[in-house]
Image (cartoon, rainbow, N blue to C red):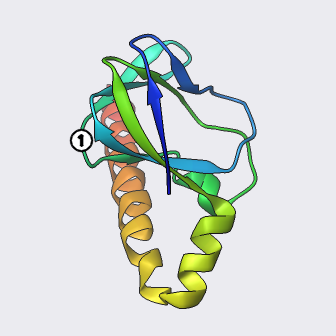
């Protein structure tokens, strides 16, 4: 896993771009936005960009360094290799995707009630 460093304000991934890396926050915080609206702030040990490990579609959100950050970068190829060696490695990514899907469904339900 390659480690990269970003300064506050640096865009790490941009909504709509096509890349195949996911990131683990080793130090610092990032902000997740979609169409300019803040969705979340993620901190140490959080993963983002995980959908890119699964599909080859454009990014769903923009992630910007809120503070100085150190990130572990995982490419789709690295992840495929890991899954071949340790198939259970897919479980944490699936949990994250599932949790985020459930959160999205809760938001959609709340919006529908308004």
- The local secondary structure at tag 1 comes to loop
Report x, y in % for residue 36: 51, 12
Q: In this rendering, is residue 104 above or below 8?
A: below
Residue 20, compared with residue 69, is above or below; it is below
- In depth, the one of 10 and 42 nearer the eye is 10
- Occupied quadrant, residue 113: top left
Q: Residue 43: which quarter of the image?
A: top left
User: Which of 19/4 is in front?
Assistant: 4
Q: Residue 52's spot in the image, x, y percent?
A: 63, 52
Left/right placement of residue 41 relative to residue 77 reads left
Q: Position of residue 35 (x, y in %)?
A: 56, 17
Badge 1: residue crowd in 10 Å (few <14, some 14–19, many ≥20): some
Screen quadrant of the C terminus: top left
Question: Image point 34% across, 37% down: which residue?
Answer: 107
| Residue 22 vertical position relative to residue 4 in the rendered view, above or below | below
Q: Is residue 90 above or below residue 86?
A: above
Q: Nearer the viewer, residue 51 or 81?
A: 81
Q: Residue at x 34, y 17 (%)?
A: 66
Q: Residue at x 38, y 51 (%)?
A: 100
* Number of marks present in the image shown: 1
Q: Quadrant of residue 32?
A: top left
Residue at 73%, 32% (x, y): give it.
17
Residue 27, horizontal then vertical, whole percent: 27, 36
Instruction: Give the labeled residue for mark 1.
Output: 44
């Amino acid at each position: 896993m390659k480690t990269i460093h970003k300064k506050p304000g640096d865009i790490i991934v941009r909504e709509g771009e096509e890349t195949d890396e996911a990131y683990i926050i080793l130090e610092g915080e990032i902000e997740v936005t979609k169409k300019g609206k803040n969705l979340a702030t993620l901190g140490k040990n959080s993963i983002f960009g995980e959908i890119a490990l699964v599909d080859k579609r454009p990014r769903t959100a923009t992630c910007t360094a809120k503070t100085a950050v150190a990130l572990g970068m995982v490419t789709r190829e690295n992840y495929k290799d890991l899954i071949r060696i340790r198939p259970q490695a897919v479980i944490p990514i699936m949990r994250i995707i599932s949790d985020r899907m459930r959160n999205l469904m809760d938001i959609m339900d709340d919006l529908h009630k308004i």
